[in-house]
Image: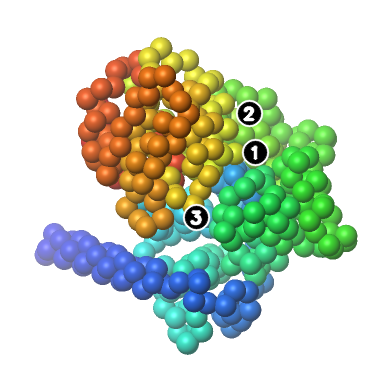
């Protein structure tokens, strides 16, 4: 009888998980049909719904992270800092690589399907006929889930820009801008000054507002009209209490090769918010527990296979430095897929200095750049012996590379999150 009940319980549990998974899939299909161009821009709609749900004033401390590049590194470091300090932390990031649940993490684990479904049902009931974009809907879901978890810290990553981004309905205790570079120009503007003005929207007069470098600081100061808002860099003595700070430069410890300024922004923010934590912060332990997929992530060795979601020129420059820091006794091969609205020529030109063979791949969405168009960008660089291939999907790309790669070669899967996602979905890599 006991075994029979146990078997029934397992079967019921599996059935429930399947139902929750199916319901979540249906929710995502529904909200993916919401189109921002059909909705009036502004935060009033989402703010009204958040207010009705009691989400505008979280009890936890809140850090908002904006910037063109480095947001993911900063958020992952903050999450690790909180967990190592025995604090309860919720993180909201985008996009995801394999499953939507990656976007909402509680204490280092992805949100459950059941919790997402409950949040989506509450939001749908509350919004009535009020239109929401996909990102507004999912942001409300994250805040709804966080509101049930008794968290000490909430970390919200800006999806696009800052001023009109859905996470900006929350007043943060700390606002971070990592870097400013040209990206999403259709939405944010064509100049760095215009982009800076949009990102500056996450700052508050009564919060700690940190920036990553001097260039970003100057752009923000020249772009904002509210002189009462204080922008500042990290102060020289602000990180004196951190143990093993020098480990940032050690690739054996900092295995993702996270950039110094993004780590230090996370450290300074955390220290300022939780000054009452007595135990010293050992950066070596922080690095050990960081979880960050697709950021110079080693998938296997011999041959070395690395995935990286660098998808704009600034990120390409950072990736180039990381590539060149590794000794390669063979050839560097890149499987690359990009969005058509990115600065693809500039991106390829930066990395072409270190790539011996390009393998371009079409992406399975309308915004994806055609592999043949990316190929044309390489041809225009006037390489003496151009060696590059084009494929319609990731499976064909990896099949080709599997045939020609040697143990001493380095393979990089780079570009859009979709590019890395399509690679990770494949069971066969290069064993």
- The number of numbered badges drawn on the structure is 3
Q: Which corner quadrant holds the N terminus?
A: bottom left
Look at the numbered discs 1 and 2 and tell me whether their residues touch, using CB distance below 8 Å.
yes
Tell us which disc is closer to us: 1 or 3: 3
- Residue 270 in picture, x, y percent from top left: 69, 47
**Residue hosting label 3:** 94
The mark nearer the N terminus, 1 or 2, is 2
**Residue hosting label 1:** 263
Question: Taking the image as drawn, is residue 199 in sight?
Answer: no
Q: Residue furthest bottom?
A: 128
The mark nearer the N terminus, 1 or 3, is 3
Q: CA distance from mark 1 to mark 3?
A: 19 Å
Secondary structure beneath dot 1 equals helix
Density class for disc 1 (Cα within 10 Å; few <14, some 14-19, many ≥20) is many
Question: Foreground residue, 415 or 159?
Answer: 415
Above or below, 50 relative to 152: below
Above or below, 185 relative to 307: below
In this picture, residue 360 sits left or right of residue 232: left
Question: Foreground residue, 68 or 166?
Answer: 68
The mark nearer the N terminus, 3 or 2, is 3
Question: Foreground residue, 236 or 79?
Answer: 236
- Residue 222 in picture, x, y percent from top left: 82, 52
Tell us which disc is closer to us: 3 or 2: 3
Question: Taking the image as drawn, is residue 386 in sight?
Answer: yes
**Residue hosting label 2:** 248
Secondary structure beneath dot 3 equals loop
């Amino acid at each position: 009888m006991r075994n029979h009940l146990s078997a029934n319980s397992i079967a019921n549990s599996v059935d429930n998980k399947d139902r929750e998974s199916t319901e979540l899939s249906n929710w995502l299909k529904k909200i993916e049909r919401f189109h921002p161009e059909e909705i009036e821009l502004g935060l009033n709609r989402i703010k009204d719904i958040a207010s009705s749900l009691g989400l505008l004033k979280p009890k936890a401390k809140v850090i908002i992270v904006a910037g063109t590049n480095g947001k993911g590194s900063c958020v992952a470091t903050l999450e690790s800092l909180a967990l190592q300090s025995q604090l309860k932390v919720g993180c909201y990031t985008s996009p995801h690589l394999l499953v939507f649940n990656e976007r909402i993490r509680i204490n280092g684990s992805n949100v459950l399907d059941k919790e997402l479904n409950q949040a989506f049902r509450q939001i749908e009931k509350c919004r009535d006929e009020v239109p929401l974009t996909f990102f507004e809907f999912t942001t409300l879901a994250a805040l709804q889930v966080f509101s049930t978890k008794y968290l000490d810290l909430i970390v919200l990553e800006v999806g696009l820009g800052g001023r009109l981004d859905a996470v900006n309905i929350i007043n943060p205790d700390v606002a971070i801008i990592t870097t400013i570079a040209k990206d999403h120009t259709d939405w944010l503007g064509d100049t760095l000054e215009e982009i800076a003005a949009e990102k500056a929207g996450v700052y508050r007069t009564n919060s700690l507002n940190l920036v990553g470098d001097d260039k970003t600081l100057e752009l923000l100061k020249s772009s904002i009209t509210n002189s009462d808002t204080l922008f500042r860099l990290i102060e020289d003595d602000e990180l004196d209490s951190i143990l093993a700070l020098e480990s940032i430069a050690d690739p054996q410890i900092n295995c993702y090769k996270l950039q110094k300024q993004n780590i230090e922004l996370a450290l300074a923010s955390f220290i300022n918010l939780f000054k009452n934590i007595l135990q010293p912060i050992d950066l070596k332990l922080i690095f050990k527990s960081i979880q960050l997929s697709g950021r110079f992530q080693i998938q296997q060795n011999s041959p070395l296979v690395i995935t990286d979601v660098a998808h704009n020129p600034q990120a390409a420059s950072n990736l180039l430095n990381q590539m060149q820091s590794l000794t390669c006794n063979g050839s560097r091969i890149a499987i690359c897929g990009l969005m058509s609205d990115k600065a693809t020529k500039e991106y390829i030109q930066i990395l072409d200095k270190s790539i011996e063979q390009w393998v371009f791949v079409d992406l399975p969405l309308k915004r994806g750049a055609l592999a043949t168009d990316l190929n044309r960008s390489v041809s225009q660089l006037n390489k003496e012996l151009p060696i590059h291939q084009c494929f319609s999907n990731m499976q064909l790309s990896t099949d080709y590379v599997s045939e020609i790669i040697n143990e001493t070669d380095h393979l990089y899967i780079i570009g859009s999150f979709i590019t890395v996602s399509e690679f990770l979905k494949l069971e066969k890599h290069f064993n």
